[in-house]
Image: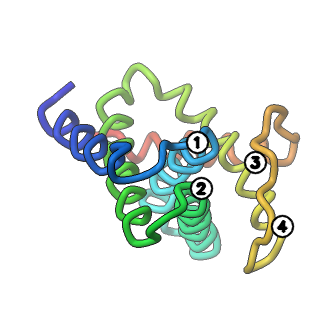
Amino acid sequence: MNKLTCAALALFAIATSPAQASPESRLAKQALHCSAIFSVFADTLTEDAKLATEFRRGVAIFTELYVREREGDRAAATHEAELGRAALLLQFREQLAEREPYLREDGVVCGAWADGFFAQGEDWSYVPVYPKVIGFGSRQKYTPIGAQAFKRWKP
C-alpha cells in the first residue's frame, strides 16, 4: 500500500473505532462498499444525465443506509461514511490492475441491490435483501456500465 492509502485507512479506522461509534454491521459494510462503487460510476459516466443522476442517487441511498446502520450521531456517521468511501476508493485505485474484474462484478451486484431501492420511488422505506442471485435485467444493465466506468477510471 502507498502512504496515501495507509493514511486514509488509518483515519477511517480512527473515525470508526469502538470508542466513538458502534461496530459496523455487515449491512453497513456492504452499503459503504456499494456507495464507493456507485461513486466510480457517477464520476466516470457523466455524459448520460439520467444515468448520472441515478448513480448519484445510489451513492446517497447507500450512504444513508450506512448512516442508519451505524445509529447514534447522524453527523458523525455521515462523516465516517465519507472517510470510509474515500479509503475504499483509494484501495480500489491501488488494486485496480489486479482486481478490476472483481470490481466490475461488484458493480453488477451493487446495481442489482440499488434497483431494489430505486423501484420504491424517491423515498425508500425498506431495505431490499443484498442480492445473491442477479437477475438477467440487472446483469445486462450493469455489466457494460462497470466495464466502461472502471476502464475510464484507470489512472
Secondary-structure class at tag 4: loop
Compared with 84, 102 (above or below) is above
Q: Which residue is mark 2?
A: 69
- The quadrant of the rendering that contains the C terminus is top left
Q: Which residue is mark 4?
A: 119
Q: Residue at x 37, y 49 (%)?
A: 84
Which amino acid type corresponds to the residue marked 2 in the rendered image? Glu
In the picture as drawn, the residue positioned furthest to the front comes out as 19
Observer-side mark, 1 or 4, equals 1
- Counting residues from the start of the chain, the first of labels 4 and 2 encountered is 2
Q: Which residue is mark 3?
A: 112
Q: Residue at x 38, y 36 (%)?
A: 92
Which amino acid type corresponds to the residue marked 3 in the rendered image? Ala
Viewer-side residue, 87 vs 48: 87
Observer-side mark, 1 or 3, equals 1
Compared with 20, 150 (above or below) is above
- Counting residues from the start of the chain, the first of labels 2 and 3 encountered is 2
Give neighbour class at mark 1: few <14, some 14-19, many 20+ (Cα, 10 Å): few
- Counting residues from the start of the chain, the first of labels 4 and 3 encountered is 3
Horizontally, residue 79 falls left or right of residue 103, namely left
- Counting residues from the start of the chain, the first of labels 1 and 3 encountered is 1
Q: Residue at x 61, y 48 (%)?
A: 145
Is disc 1 in contact with disc 4, using a CB cutoff of under 8 Å? no
Give neighbour class at mark 4: few <14, some 14-19, many 20+ (Cα, 10 Å): few
Give neighbour class at mark 2: few <14, some 14-19, many 20+ (Cα, 10 Å): some
User: Where, by quadrant of the figure, is residue 130 drawn?
Assistant: top right
- Counting residues from the start of the chain, the first of labels 1 and 2 encountered is 1
Viewer-side residue, 95 vs 147: 95
